[in-house]
Amino acid sequence: MQTPGWYLVAYDITEPKRLRRVHRYLRQHGLSVQESLFFLCRTEAGLVDLLDDLAALMHLLRDDLRAYPVEHPSRVWLSGSTPVEGPLLRPGSGGRPKAGKRPEARESKSLMRRLWGKRNER
């Protein structure tokens, strides 16, 4: 069985109706970082299935969808206004919370628990 890995998924959708469908789908399956960026934890086969599902919602000649493998969300430099806070921000970004304080969960708890699972591994 494959080990799940992290992916940063980005999209650019030209038509508002398709944009809403893709965004809604990704909100159900991933963690929103920005309006068109999501972190997903999937096996490679699971990611291919998810991308196939998204392709069915998109216009393949006008829209753009990309998935970039990342070691862990904590390895991605985040700064500015973002719904992802706390241990996902790297030191020096100015948005890191004080030690011992857990940021508010804005997505489903199960996803956040998986995301923060092993806090000390960086």
Image (cartoon, helix red, strand yellow):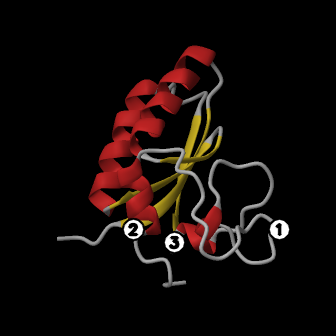
Circle 3 packing at 10 Å, graded few (<14), some (14-19), many (20+), is some
Q: How many marks?
A: 3
Q: Are marks 1 and 2 in contact (CB under 8 Å)?
A: no
**Mark 2, secondary structure of its residue:** strand
The N terminus is located in which quarter? Answer: bottom left
**Mark 1, secondary structure of its residue:** loop
Q: CA distance from mark 3 to mark 1?
A: 20 Å
| Label 3 sits on residue | 72
Q: Are marks 2 and 3 in contact (CB under 8 Å)?
A: no
**Mark 3, secondary structure of its residue:** loop
Mark 3 vs mark 1, foreground winner is: 1
In the foreground, 87 or 32: 87
Residue located 60% across and 58% down the image: 103
Q: Is residue 79 left or right of residue 8?
A: right
Is 60 placed above or below 98 here? above
Whole-percent x, y for residue 96 in the image: 73, 68
Whole-percent x, y for residue 28 in the image: 40, 37
Q: CA distance from mark 1 to mark 2?
A: 27 Å
Q: Amino acid at mark 3?
A: His
Residue located 59% across and 71% down the image: 74
Q: Amino acid at mark 2?
A: Gly
Q: Point out which mark residue 80 bears.
A: none
The quarter of the picture where residue 122 lies is bottom right
In the foreground, 103 or 4: 103
| Residue at the far left in the pictured view | 1
| Label 2 sits on residue | 5
Q: Is residue 74 left or right of residue 53?
A: right
Q: Point out which mark residue 94 bears.
A: 1
Is 25 placed above or below 51 here? above
Mark before the other along the chain sequence, 3 or 1: 3
